[in-house]
Image (tube, helix red, strand yellow):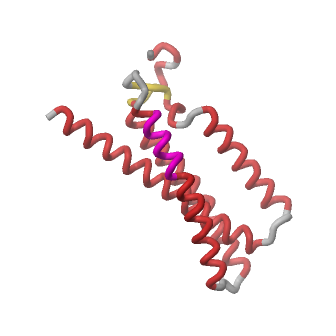
C-alpha cells in the first residue's frame, strides 16, 4: 500500500540495488580503515594476511546467509513497491547501529592495537563489500527472472 509514504516508494527489486550500494560503501570504508592501519603498523607478515582471510571467511559466510535471507524477504513482499528503507528489517538496522557504534568506540578508545584494527577491519570490510556485490548480483538476476517470466 503506497499511502504510508508514497514519495519514498521504490520497486521491491530496487531494494536489492539499494542494499548493494549500502553494503559496498560500508565495506569499502571499513576495509579502507584496515588498510590504513596496515600502513601504520609497517611490517606486514603472512600471519596478518592469513588472519584477515580468516576474518573475511567467517564474516563472509555470515553475510552470505544474511543476504540470502534479505533477498527472500524482499522478493516475498506482496506489494510491488515498498518504502526505500525496507531493504533492511528492524533487527538488521539495530545490528548495523551496534556494529558501527562499537567499531567507532573501539578505535577511539585505543583499547586494541593498530594490528588488530588492520587484520580485523580489512577482513570485515572485504566481507561487507562482498555482500554488497552479492546484493547487486541478486538485483541483476531478479531483472533476468522478470524478463524470462514475461516471455
User: Which of 135 and 11 lies nearest the eye of the viewer?
Assistant: 135
Q: Residue at x 48, y 52 (%)?
A: 132
Q: Is residue 52 left or right of residue 115?
A: left
Q: Tell me which residue sits at (44%, 15%) in the image.
A: 1
* Magenta stretch in the rendered image: 64-73
Residue 139 counted in the magenta span: no
Taking the magenta stretch, the answer to whether it contains residue 69 is yes
Q: Quadrant of residue 35?
A: bottom right
- Of all residues shown, which one is farthest toward the top? 3
Q: Main secondary structure of the magenta part?
A: helix
Could you tell me which residue is drawn at 52 percent across and 57 percent down? Answer: 129
Horizontal side of 55 relative to 7 (left or right) equals right
> Is 78 displayed left or right of 130 in the figure?
left
Determine the residue located farthest toward the left in the rendered image: 151
Residue 89's image quarter?
Answer: top right
Q: Choose between 89 and 104: the one closer to the eye.
A: 89
Is residue 52 positioned above or below 68 on the image? below
The percent position of residue 50, horizontal first and vertical second, equals 60, 77
Where residue 10 appears, x then y in whole percent? 42, 29
Q: Is residue 79 above or below residue 49?
A: above
Q: Is residue 123 above or below residue 66?
A: below
Please name whichever residue, 110 or 61, is drawn nearer the observer in this view of the structure.
61
Image spot of residue 127 (x, y percent): 55, 60
Residue at image location 37% in from the left, 44% down from the top: 139
Count the numbered circles shown: 0
- Residue 33 location, x and y as percent? 66, 65
31 up-or-down from 139: above or below? below
Amino acid at each position: 500500500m503506497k499511502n504510508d509514504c508514497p514519495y519514498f516508494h521504490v520497486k521491491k527489486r530496487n531494494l536489492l540495488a539499494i542494499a548493494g550500494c549500502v553494503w559496498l560503501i560500508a565495506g569499502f570504508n571499513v576495509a579502507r580503515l584496515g588498510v590504513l592501519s596496515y600502513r601504520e603498523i609497517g611490517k606486514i607478515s603472512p600471519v596478518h594476511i592469513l588472519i584477515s582471510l580468516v576474518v573475511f571467511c567467517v564474516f563472509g559466510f555470515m553475510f552470505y546467509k544474511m543476504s540470502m535471507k534479505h533477498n527472500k524477504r524482499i522478493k516475498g513482499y506482496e506489494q510491488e513497491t515498498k518504502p526505500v528503507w525496507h531493504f533492511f528489517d528492524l533487527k538488521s538496522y539495530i545490528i548495523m547501529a551496534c556494529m558501527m557504534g562499537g567499531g567507532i568506540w573501539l578505535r577511539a578508545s585505543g583499547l586494541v592495537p593498530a594490528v588488530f584494527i588492520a587484520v580485523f577491519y580489512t577482513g570485515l570490510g572485504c566481507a561487507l563489500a562482498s555482500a554488497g556485490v552479492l546484493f547487486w548480483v541478486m538485483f541483476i538476476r531478479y531483472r533476468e527472472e522478470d524478463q524470462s517470466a514475461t516471455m
